[in-house]
Image (tube, rainbow, N blue to C red):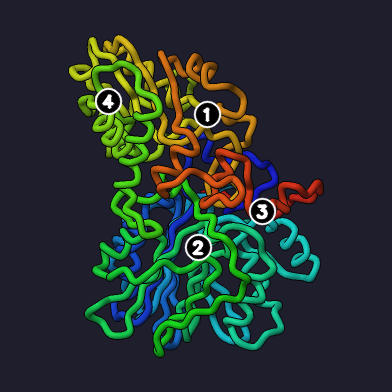
């Protein structure tokens, strides 16, 4: 996370979609650690596209390369990879929730300590980062970035405990928030999940390399490097990997897990296994449940690519309708650039999507998407489908209405900018321009993901963006202090 006093998420000036913040990856005990880490980060590119970095350890020194942009651009140069020797490495892909993307905020962060070097890569948000940062600055700590991840570095530095792991535990017990992190020292690779297990982290190993282990945000990163899945790192667990193997430390009292349900809906890659469940199959079940809850008379089911595809397949099968690719996505376009005029900006959606007129003309269409945030992109897509000749357009959404901002690692706008926070479903339908609009119910979503309805006394997932039920204290949000100035340094990319 990058913290900035403005409070305006920069990403929302560009796109109308939810974004995961980061992906993390780490390997231990392999001769080609940097190359495998680059491959793992490539598989996790969907979790962060703004910057990437790798830190390795060669037995004597740490080596680092961090860059803005995509993994393929940062690590395609053989000279860069040659400068990252060692049998241990961690890597990080970043999508900033707020603030500018500049090199000083790119992870993994590295620092020299009394005990040696330490590199840290962090996925998630600390909800008391401002409060901790103010206290640390008063103590004389000098911050080099505007990321909450750097709070970990300073808390470790001032800890009075002796070992690295004990210092890390001391630091972790002072932070609040949702996080998973990987850390690398000269002696170990370390992985951590917060006590509620909101953000994902998994453990794998190389079956043909004795003593070689992997930590990653998702199982798809194991597949690309040829590693085997071992297990999820448990909520509130620290795994320490060294030449003796893997040991587990659980320094917190056990909490009921509140894994982020949006990982199942959108964030995780469809070919990943999340919390023991195949993401692709879950998304099809969500679509089928959505069709059972709300199925208007229609001729075809069309996904909004790519995130709406699995749910649309499930919806079409349950509704007994043809599944058609009525919208074609241009995969050769990255994030929409900052266009110079309102007229050109309005046309920006056509850079990424175009209507398949032959499939749409003269038909009643059910459009399936994963979410509606501000509604701007949905409105443009509906206009495009109508312009291609669709006689009716019905939109079905495979998540409940997004009515609250996330403070745990998902990039969402302020609540007053969320369409569902300001309008009921009928009003949203009019704004978007559809003949009808329906979202899956919260109980329907839970049934599709976990096989049972939501238990309001002990929800099985973190669903705060739909319900406003925040399981972790929001210390910084509730802080009325205006002391939010983090840095006087302005940088250009």
Question: Residue 143, can we see it?
Answer: yes
Are the residues at dot 1 and dot 2 in contact (C-beta closer than 8 Å)? Answer: no
Above or below: residue 135 compared with residue 89? above
Q: Secondary structure at mark 2?
A: loop
Q: Residue at x 52, y 65 (%)?
A: 235
In the rendered image, the vertical position of residue 404 relative to residue 368, given as above or below:
below
Which of marks 2 and 1 precedes in the sequence? 2
Identify the residue position indicated by label 4 in the image: 301
Q: CA distance from mark 1 to mark 4?
A: 23 Å
Does dot 4 land on a helix, a strand or a loop? strand
Assess disc 3: are there few (<14), some (14-19) or many (≥20) residues with their C-alpha within 10 Å of its C-alpha.
Answer: few
Q: Mark 3: which secondary structure?
A: loop
Classify mark 1: helix, strand or loop: loop
Q: Is residue 177 left or right of residue 337?
A: right
Number of the label disc, if any, that sits on residue 397: none
| Coordinates of residue 61 in the picture (x, y in percent) | 45, 83
Measured Cα–Cα span from mark 2 to mark 4: 41 Å
Residue 302 % position (x, y): 28, 26
Mark number for residue 489?
Answer: 3
Image quadrant occupied by the N terminus:
bottom right
Q: Does 217 appear above or below 333? A: below
Q: Which residue is mark 1?
A: 374
How many residues crowd around disc 4 within 10 Å: few (fewer than 14), some, or many (20 or more)?
Answer: many
Q: Find the distance from the CA under tag 3 to the CA under tag 1.
A: 32 Å
Give me the residue at 75% from left, 58% from top: 131
Q: Looking at the rendering, which quadrant does residue 87 occupy?
A: bottom left
Instruction: Give how far apart the Cα atoms at labels 1 and 2 are.
Output: 30 Å
Query: How far across and down, in percent of the image, does residue 7 sit?
Result: 66, 42
């Amino acid at each position: 996370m990058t913290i900035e006093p403005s409070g305006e998420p920069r990403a929302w000036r560009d796109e109308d979609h939810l974004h995961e913040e980061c992906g993390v990856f780490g390997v231990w005990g392999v001769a080609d650690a940097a190359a495998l880490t680059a491959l793992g980060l490539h598989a996790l590119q969907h979790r962060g596209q703004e910057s990437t970095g790798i830190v390795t350890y060669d037995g004597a020194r740490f080596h680092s390369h961090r860059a803005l942009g995509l993994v393929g651009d940062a690590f395609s140069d053989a000279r860069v990879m040659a400068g990252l020797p060692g049998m241990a490495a961690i890597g990080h892909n970043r999508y900033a929730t707020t603030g500018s993307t500049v090199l000083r905020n790119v992870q993994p962060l590295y620092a020299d300590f009394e005990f040696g070097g330490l590199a840290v890569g962090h996925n998630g948000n600390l909800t008391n980062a401002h409060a901790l940062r103010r206290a640390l600055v008063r103590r004389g700590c000098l911050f080099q970035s505007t990321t909450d991840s750097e709070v970990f570095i300073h808390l470790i530095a001032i800890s009075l405990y002796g070992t690295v792991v004990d210092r890390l535990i001391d630091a972790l017990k002072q932070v609040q928030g949702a996080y998973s992190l990987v850390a690398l020292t000269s002696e170990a690779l370390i992985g951590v999940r917060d006590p509620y297990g909101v953000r994902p982290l998994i453990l794998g190993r190389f079956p043909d390399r004795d003593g070689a282990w992997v930590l990653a945000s998702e199982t798809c990163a194991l597949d690309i490097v040829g590693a085997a899945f071992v297990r999820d790192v448990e909520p509130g667990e620290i795994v320490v990997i060294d030449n003796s193997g893997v040991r587990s430390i659980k320094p917190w009292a056990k909490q009921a897990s509140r894994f982020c349900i949006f990982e199942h809906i959108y964030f995780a890659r469809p070919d990943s296994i999340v919390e023991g469940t195949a993401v692709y199959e879950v998304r099809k079940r969500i679509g089928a449940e959505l069709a059972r809850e709300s199925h208007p008379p229609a001729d075809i089911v069309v996904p909004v690519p790519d995130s709406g595809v699995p749910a649309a397949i499930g919806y079409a099968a349950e509704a007994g309708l043809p599944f058609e690719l009525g919208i074609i996505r241009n995969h050769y376009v990255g994030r929409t650039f900052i266009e110079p005029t309102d007229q050109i900006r309005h046309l920006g959606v056509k850079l990424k999507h175009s209507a398949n007129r032959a499939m749409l003309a003269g038909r009643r269409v059910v459009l399936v998407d994963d979410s509606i945030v501000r509604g701007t992109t949905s409105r443009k897509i509906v206009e495009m489908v109508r312009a291609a000749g669709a006689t009716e357009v019905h939109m079905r959404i495979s998540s409940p209405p997004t009515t609250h901002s996330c403070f745990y690692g998902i990039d969402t706008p302020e609540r007053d900018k969320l369409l569902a926070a300001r309008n009921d479903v009928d009003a949203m339908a009019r704004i978007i321009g559809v003949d009808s609009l329906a979202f899956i119910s919260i109980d329907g979503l839970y049934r599709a993901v976990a096989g049972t309805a939501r238990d309001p006394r002990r929800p099985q997932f973190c669903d705060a963006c739909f319900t406003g039920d925040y399981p972790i204290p929001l210390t910084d949000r509730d802080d009325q202090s205006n002391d939010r100035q983090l840095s006087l340094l302005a940088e250009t990319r």
